[in-house]
Image (cartoon, rainbow, N blue to C red):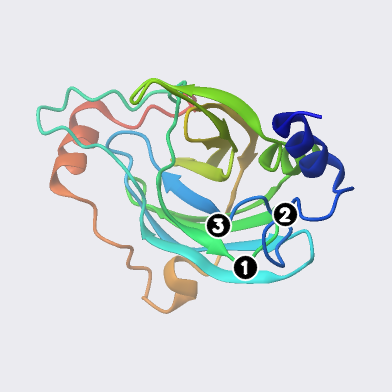
Amino acid sequence: MSKFKLLWVCAVFGLMVGCTKGSNGLPYDGWRLGLFAPNYMEVWIETADAVDVRDRVFKRAMSGVAAIQTPKNLKGNPRGWPSYPGWGKGKYVYGAAVPRLIYVRWQSLVEPQTYEAYIVIPTAIQQAMVKPEKAFCEFDAKWITGYRKGVTVGLAPGGIAKVWISGPCVSPIEVTRVQGEVVKEGPYGGKSEGHHFPLGETSKAYIEKYGVPYGSW
C-alpha cells in the first residue's frame, strides 16, 4: 500500500495504529480557527469558542479584530464572498480533536449590532479535515500531502456567518451559511451601556457614501 493511500485509510477510518499524532486524534498538531469580514464591514469578535467531537470546550479560541481590507480610496468591493477566502485572522486550537460546533459572538460595527451564531460542523466535513490530499504548491513548485486544517468564518452585516475549511495548497470546501441572532443584552453582555467597539474612519467613510450591501452575502 502506498504512503498516500495508507494516510487516507488512517484519516477516514482510524483503523491503523500510528496514523495520528498525540491525544487529539489528528494527523497534525492542531487545526486553526480564523475569521474575516468583507471589505469595510468591520467586526469585533467578543468570543469564538469551539467544541470538539469529544465534547471538550475551548473558550475564546479567538477574539478581537477579524481580518479585513479597508482600501483608503474606497475602491474595495465588500459584496459577496471570495472564491478563495484564505485563513482569516486567528489562532491554532491545540489539544482539540476536530470541531463539531463553533460559537461566535461578534459586533457588526457598521450597523452597529451584536450577533451570535452556532455553527455545526457536519461529520463529512470533520472527515475532510483529516483526509490527506495530494496537492501542488505553485510558490515552490512542489507536490505535498496537504490537509484542510483551517476553519475560516466570514462575518457580515445582518448576522451572516459563512464557513469554509482549507489548507496550504489545497482548495477550500464550503461548509455552511448560518443566520446569526441578535444578542438581546447588547455588546459585551450588556456591560458597556450599549457602546460598541468604534468603527474605523475609512470604513465609516465608505458606509456614508455607499451604504451596506445587505443581501449580497
Reading the chain from its start, which is encountered first: label 1 or label 3? Answer: 1
Q: Residue at x 36, y 46 (%)?
A: 111
| Three-letter amino acid code at the position of disc 1 | Gly
Tell me the crowding category of disc 2: few under 14, some 14 to 19, or many 20 or more residues within 10 angstroms, Cα based.
Answer: some
Q: CA distance from mark 2 to mark 3?
A: 29 Å
Residue wearing tag 1: 95
Residue wearing tag 2: 20
Tell me the crowding category of disc 1: few under 14, some 14 to 19, or many 20 or more residues within 10 angstroms, Cα based.
Answer: some
Q: Residue 37, which numbered label?
A: none
Residue wearing tag 3: 104
| Three-letter amino acid code at the position of disc 3 | Val
Residue 132 pos. (x, y %):
67, 34
User: On the rendered image, what quadrant is the N terminus found in?
Assistant: top right
Q: Is residue 26 visible?
A: yes
Reading the chain from its start, which is encountered first: label 1 or label 2? Answer: 2
Tell me the crowding category of disc 3: few under 14, some 14 to 19, or many 20 or more residues within 10 angstroms, Cα based.
Answer: many
Reading the chain from its start, which is encountered first: label 2 or label 3? Answer: 2
Residue 116 pos. (x, y %):
57, 56
Q: Nearer the viewer, mark 1 or mark 3?
A: 1
Residue 3 pos. (x, y %):
71, 34
Residue 127 pos. (x, y %):
76, 40
Q: Residue at x 29, y 30 (%)?
A: 211
